Image (tube, rainbow, N blue to C red):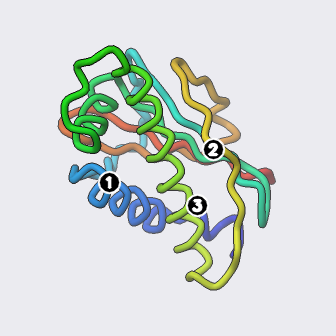
Amino acid sequence: MTKQDVLKAETVIQAVSEAFENMAFLEAVPNTEKKVPGVQNSCYSKIEILSPFSGYVAVVCNESVATDITKAVFGDISHSQAELKKLDTLGEMVNTIAGRLLYHSAGGREPFELGLPNVGHGLTWDTKEVDIYSFTVDQNILLVIIYIAR
């Protein structure tokens, strides 16, 4: 598996589509515009790639998308632990996306290792160092940000 394999748009689209369809029964439609839209009121989940090279995969979305994903996984989330469940679900989502991405990049033939997801609000990134893939989920924007150490 090469770093370029991980950054192929079709591989990213396949990994994101599989994760959303299997976990949340939602469709993530890739956006074709080159301009990366902003995400208001964003929350994120980020997971480190430990091997075969270093980097990270992050998912950034607004609260509405995070809530939709969480409701699809847990059902009603109107109780006191709604925020915790939402962040936990985003952690599982980025773990699944990163795992599928590395699996497909290697054709299922090479091992890889991921760290534990970090979740929160307001992730920032340097647009010169990352590759950003934009998707629409239920009329909202979701970004998948990939950094591979060069």
Q: Residue furthest front?
A: 80
* Mark 3 and mark 1: Cα distance apart in space: 23 Å
Say which of marks 2 and 1 sits in front.
1
Say which of marks 3 and 2 sits in front.
2
* Mark 2 and mark 1: Cα distance apart in space: 18 Å
Marking on residue 7: 3
Mark 2, secondary structure of its residue: strand
Q: What residue did someone put label 1 on?
A: 23
Nearer to the camera, 33 or 52:
52
Residue under the image location 39 percent in, 20 percent down: 83
Label 2 crowding class (10 Å Cα cut-off): few <14, some 14-19, many 20+?
Answer: many
* Mark 3 and mark 2: Cα distance apart in space: 16 Å
Q: Which amino acid does label 2 sit on?
A: Ile
Quarter that holds the N terminus? bottom right
Q: Do the residues labelled 3 and 1 touch (CB within 8 Å)?
A: no
Q: What residue did someone put label 2 on?
A: 47
Q: What residue type is labelled 3?
A: Leu
Say which of marks 3 and 1 sits in front.
1
Residue under the image location 23 percent in, 35 percent down: 71
Residue under the image location 39 percent in, 24 percent down: 39
